[in-house]
Image (cartoon, rainbow, N blue to C red):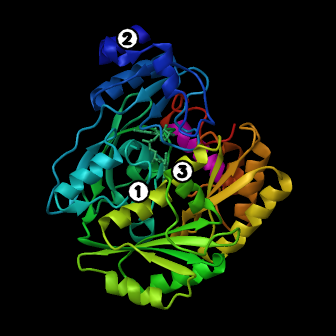
Amino acid sequence: VAARLREIVGPEHVVDDADVIDSFARDWTGRFHGRASLVVRPKDTGEVAAVLRVLHDAGVPVVPQGGNTGLVGGGVPMEGEVVLTLRRLDQLGELEPLTAQVTAGAGVTLAQLSAHARAAGRDFAIDHGGRDAATVGGMIATNSGGIHAVRYGTTRAQVVGVEAVLADGSVVGSLAGLVKDTAGYDLASLLVGSEGTLAVITRARLRLVPRPAFHATALLALRDGEAALHAFATLRAQVPSLHAAEAVFGDGLELAAERLGVEVPVGGGGGERGVHVLVEAASHIDPLDELAAALDEIDADGVAFAQDARQRERLWALREGISEAIAAHGIPHKLDVAVPVPVLPAFAGAVRALVARERPGARTVLFGHLGDGNLHVNVLGLDPADDDLDGAVLWCATDHGGTISAEHGIGRAKRRWLSLVRSEAEIAAMRQIKRALDPAAILNPGAVLPE
Ligand SMILES: Cc1cc2nc3c(=O)[nH]c(=O)nc-3n(C[C@H](O)[C@H](O)[C@H](O)COP(=O)(O)OP(=O)(O)OC[C@H]3O[C@@H](n4cnc5c(N)ncnc54)[C@H](O)[C@@H]3O)c2cc1C
């Protein structure tokens, strides 16, 4: 198989060096570490198709991988699978001005896509802290959300078309950019959030949004979760240009500040019950007055307004520094869940109490995307194999009317608990779809569906 793969992609793009392979077999958190037999690096759709044909005929399992920034172990080979890295599919087309769409290769990073869109006066609606490595293919495969989902929705809402290769090497999809096209089942929608289990995404036709000329950003310190919800209700009602509303519960921001060697620039809001909210408005006209008027009505312990671009960057650096600050304290259990927005404070309290009761020595750090009811539950001080606490936290989310995965996917980390949120009939339908598209079960075999 390796020899045939070398003929297809060139010998230098079939990697069997143990050290190099190992870097593809570890995830960003360090919690998932498996084993790959080879890493294959095709450069275009034709090569991906030829590679999959060989693997399919030989019955060799394969794990598609983009930037390897996923946080649920979905792109990590565990049992000697071939890794198919899509990073060389990094071509970006011209922005088409009539539709404000662009075609991007699966290996284009989020940062490259955003820079390309901005250079043409537009923006890509999705943004998040993994931007320098996360790829278009990975974002579609996980239906990435991020900081602007409160305004624009998730990746699903940005995808107009997808080109993909099925397990047997057939190429499917359309990049024609038709906003209206209801001819039969929509394969592009099916592949959004499929986590490499149904097909390998090779290119996508993506919608771009207007690039805001002005931003107004502030950090609020609030006494508790209920106060944060009230603040968000005011912002939602009075700031039509609301661009982001992020929440950090308890001492999460202090953790990031400590690591960055800075101070949290606003008093209050700390302590176990406090919440910091980072809010941003953005528009083609300056939204500063609009945001300031709304903040006047919010009963905050403290407000720090960014006075210029540098201060805005510093506020965002604090928020986005939390993941690395947590990682510096050990290997976290990262549980990305969502609950209905009105019960977010109750859920935050319940999950803290749950961890304190079940694992008294562990440390819980909670942050996330307030406007989406999306909380990242990070628990430090646990054995990486301690799945029972994961299950209890996920159950707690569903008990509050929520879901076990908001934006990171199911991957390998949560497949055991899929039945908490999907019925037997739904899981059976998923298995049938999987069987229809990948009958030999070679695509990412350990991900999403329960054993
Ligand atoms: C610091 C940090 C912050 C983050 N913040 C956010 C956030 O706010 N919101 C959010 O949604 N995510 C966030 N993430 C998670 C991550 O960046 C996203 O899940 C991203 O979409 C994964 O992209 P990737 O290219 O790294 O995919 P990978 O990690 O390589 O793969 C993820 C999954 O997609 C599959 N896959 C990858 N490429 C393809 C392809 N071409 N075809 C088919 N399947 C494929 C893999 O098999 C795997 O199942 C963050 C990550 C980090 C490290």
Quadrant location of the C terminus in the rendered image: top right
Q: Which residue is mark 1?
A: 155
Q: CA distance from mark 3 to mark 1?
A: 31 Å
Q: Which residue is mark 2?
A: 4
Indicate which label's residue lies in the foreground, 2 or 3: 3
Q: Amino acid type of disc 1? A: Thr
Question: In the rendering, at what x and y percent does residue 385 appear?
Answer: 74, 36
Q: Does the beta carbon at disc 1 come under 8 Å from ligand 1?
A: yes
Assess disc 1: are there few (<14), some (14-19) or many (≥20) residues with their C-alpha within 10 Å of its C-alpha. many
The overriding secondary structure of the stretch rendered in magenta is helix
Q: Nearer the viewer, residue 348 or 315?
A: 315
Identify the residue shown where x is 61% and y is 82%. Answer: 227
Indicate which label's residue lies in the foreground, 1 or 2: 1
Q: Label 2's element? A: helix
Q: Amino acid type of disc 2? A: Arg
Question: In the rendering, at what x and y percent does residue 101 appear?
Answer: 22, 57
**Residue 243 to residue 256: above or below:** below
* First-in-chain label (2 vs 3): 2
Assess disc 3: are there few (<14), some (14-19) or many (≥20) residues with their C-alpha within 10 Å of its C-alpha. some
